[in-house]
Amino acid sequence: MTAGTERTTGTAGTATGTPGTWGSALDSVVVYAQGALCRRLARGAVPSDGRVRVTGLPRTLDPGSLRARVLGASGLRVTEARIEVGAEPLDTDDGSRDALRHEVERLRDAASAVRGRRDRQLGLIAEAGGLHPVAPARKRDDPHRRTPVDAWLELADFVDARLAGLHTRLDELEEALEHADHAFDVASDRLARASDDAPPAHVETTVSAVLTLAGDGSDAEAEDVELEVEYGVPGAVWVPAYRLTHRQGDGTGRLVLRASVAQRTGEDWTGVRLALATADLRRRTDLPKLRSIRIGRRQEAPAPSGWREPPTGLADLFTGYEAAGPRPLTAGGFAVGAAASAPAMAGDTGMAVGGAAPGSYPPPSTGLPVPGGAYGAAPDAFGGAGSPDFAPPRPAAPGLARTARPAFGGPPPAHAAAPAPAPPGGMPVPPPPPPVPGPPQPSADDLDYASLVLSGPDGPGERRGRLFPGTGVDAVAVEYRRRAEAVAFLPLPGHAVRPRESAGSFDHRFDAVARVDVPSDRTWHTVTVAEIPVGLRTEYVCAPSVEQTVYATLVLSNATGQALLAGPVEVTVDDEFLLTAALPTLAPGGVSRVGLGPAEGIRVTRRANLRESTAGLRNNVTVLGHHVHVELANGLKGPAAVEVRERVPVTSDPDVRIEEDADWAAPDDGAGPEQHAPGTRIWRVELPAGATTVLDGRYEIRIPAGKALVGGNRRS
C-alpha cells in the first residue's frame, strides 16, 4: 500500500465532528467476471482539521474494499478512511421507483374496474338471451287456444334490439380492457426495468467516505485538492459479443468487440470510462509467507504491527463512578433512572438474567473468568488478571447475586465468591490452560481500529476501559448486496459464454475507447468496446462426397497480443446482416473459420467409380480401385479459393494396404483453423472468374484373401 492510500477492513462507523462535505462523480468502472471496481473523483478545499466527507457512494459497496488517495503533488496523503451511513427524508418522488409503483397500482385498479364492468355486461347479455315466451299451462278440459304470434314476434324483436345494444357496449368494454391491460403491462415492465439508483422509499440512505488528510506540516486549508475514492461492489457481470463487417471480393474486414453488461449495483453508470476484465474480483492476490526453519536457540516471535502495551492506571478511571453509591432499584429488581435506559456496551452479554436490566451481564456464578479480552491470546499483556494494573474483584451486592447485576457503583461479584458447581460424577474441574508465552497474535478484527468499541464501566472488570472488536452487523447492507448478486443468474444472450469459462487460466482486460452509460436496471445493455485488428480472408469449402454444395467461409486470424473470448458474432456482408454465429476463443495467433452459408455462384459435381480385381502370384489379394472425379465451375465475378475435401479409408491392420495416386494432400491440423478427421485429403484450387477445373484422385485398397469377407469388400 502506498503512502497516500488507506484501506479500511472493518464495518461502517460514525465520525465525530462536522467534516467538510464534498460531492463526487463516478469516473471509471472496471467490470470483472463478477463484481466491479468503481472510482470516484472529488475536489474541494481541505478544512483546518483535515477531515473530508465524500458523498455519493452506493449502499452495496464492500467496506473492506474502500481505498482513497490524493491526486497530484499537493503534499497531502490519506491517513484514515471510514464508511459513514446516514438517512434523510425525500422532498419528492417524481421519476423514482416509488412514483412508478404508484402508477402501476393505479393502472391495476383501473384495469380491474374495466374488467368488472365487462363482467357485468356479460351478465346482462346472459339475462337478455334467456328471455323466451312461455305458454300458460293448459288444463285437461280447456279447449285449444290460438297462439299470439304477434306477441312472440314483438318479444323476439325486443330481445334482438336489446342484445344488439348490449353487444355494442361489450365491444367498447373489451377494447377499453385491452388498452387498460396494455398500459398496465407497460408500466409493470418499466417498473421491473427501472434503475436501482433511485431510492425505493421516502427516506434516502446516503453512504459517505470520511477521510482524514495529513500533510508535511504546512497549512493546507485553502488548497484545492482532488481525491480519488475506489471501492468494490457486487452485482455486475458482462459477456463478450462481436460484430464482423465484410465485403465480398475484399480481403479485409472489421471486427468490433462489444460487450453485454448488466448491473444492479444501486448506482447508474453515466458517462464512465469502462473496462472489462476476466479476472475474479474476490480471488486473493496476496502471496503466502513461508516461515524459515532454524536450528539453534529459540527466538521470540516479533510483535504484531500496530500493537502496543495498554496504558497503566486503567482501574483508577472508575474510582469516581464506584464512589457514586449504589444504583436505585425498583421492587422488581430493575434499575431506574438514566443508567437503566442506557444501551448495552460491547462487553455486555445483551441478555437479562432474572430481574436484571436489559443489557446487563449475568453474575459469574461458575467461578470461571469471563471469556474475552482485548486480544484473547494474551490477556496478561492487555491488563488481564495477571497484570499489575488489573482492578481486583469486588464482593457482590447482597441479595442480587442471582437475580440482578451489581448495583450502581457497587462492587461486581468476585470470581472466587461463588464456588464452582460440582460436575456430574464428582470429577474435579480442570484448571484453565495457561496463556501462550510470547507476544499476542491479534486477528484482522482486532487490528481493525475503526471498528473497535470501548467497553464501559458496567462491563466485566477485565474488560472495562479497553477496546474490543464491535459485533454489530449492518443487515441492511447485507441485504442490498444479496439482491445485487442476483444479477449473476440472469439468462445469457444467445451463443454467449461467461468470461471465466472462455478465458481459461489467463486473465485479460479490454478498455472501452469512449465513455458509456449503463443503468442499474438488471437487464443486458450492449456497449461498444473497441475495434480489433484481425486477419481476414474468404475461402470456399465443399465436401462433394457428403453434399455437392460449396459453402462460403471467413477465416479469422487473431493478430493481437491478447485472446479473443468466445461469444456471438454478428456477420454483415455488403452492408446486409447475414447471420449470428458462435466465435470460439482465439489465442494470440489463433485461426478460426466462420461459415457464411452456401455460395450459389460456384458449382461442384462428383462421380466415383469402383473396380474390383485380384493380384498376387496366386491371386490371393483383392484389389479395390476407387476413382474420384470432381468438377468445379466458378460463376462469381472474381477469383475464388476453393477447398475440396475427400476421405480415404484408414486401417490399423498391417496386412491391409491403402495406396493413393492423386495430387491431393493431407491437412496440417497444427496450422489450420480446425481439426480434421483421420483420412481427410484436401485439394486447394484457385479458380479465376468464369473458370472450370477438373480434379481426379485414385486410391486402392489391397486386402489379403485371409482377411477378406465374402460379399463384404465392395465399396460404393
Image (tube, rainbow, N blue to C red):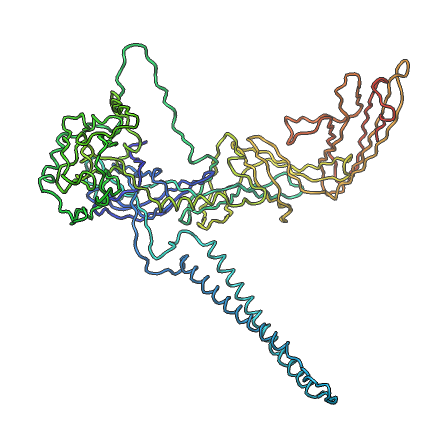
Residue drawn at (25%, 20%) of the image: 437
Image quadrant holding the C terminus, namely top right
Q: Nearer the viewer, residue 20 or 662?
A: 20
Q: How far across and down, in percent of the image, does residue 642 sit?
A: 72, 35
Q: Residue at x 86, y 20 (%)?
A: 622
Q: Is residue 184 left or right of residue 389?
A: right
Quadrant including the N terminus: top left
Q: Is residue 280 above or below residue 139?
A: above
Return the residue nearer the eye: 313 or 123.
123
Q: On the image, which quarter does residue 220 sit in?
A: top left
Residue 11 x/y as whole percent: 31, 40
Residue at the front extreme of this rendering: 141
- Figure label count: 0
Viewed as shown, does residue 210 lie left or right of 132? Answer: left
Task: Between residue 363 and residue 643, name the one nearer to us.
Answer: 363
Q: Is residue 388 visible?
A: yes
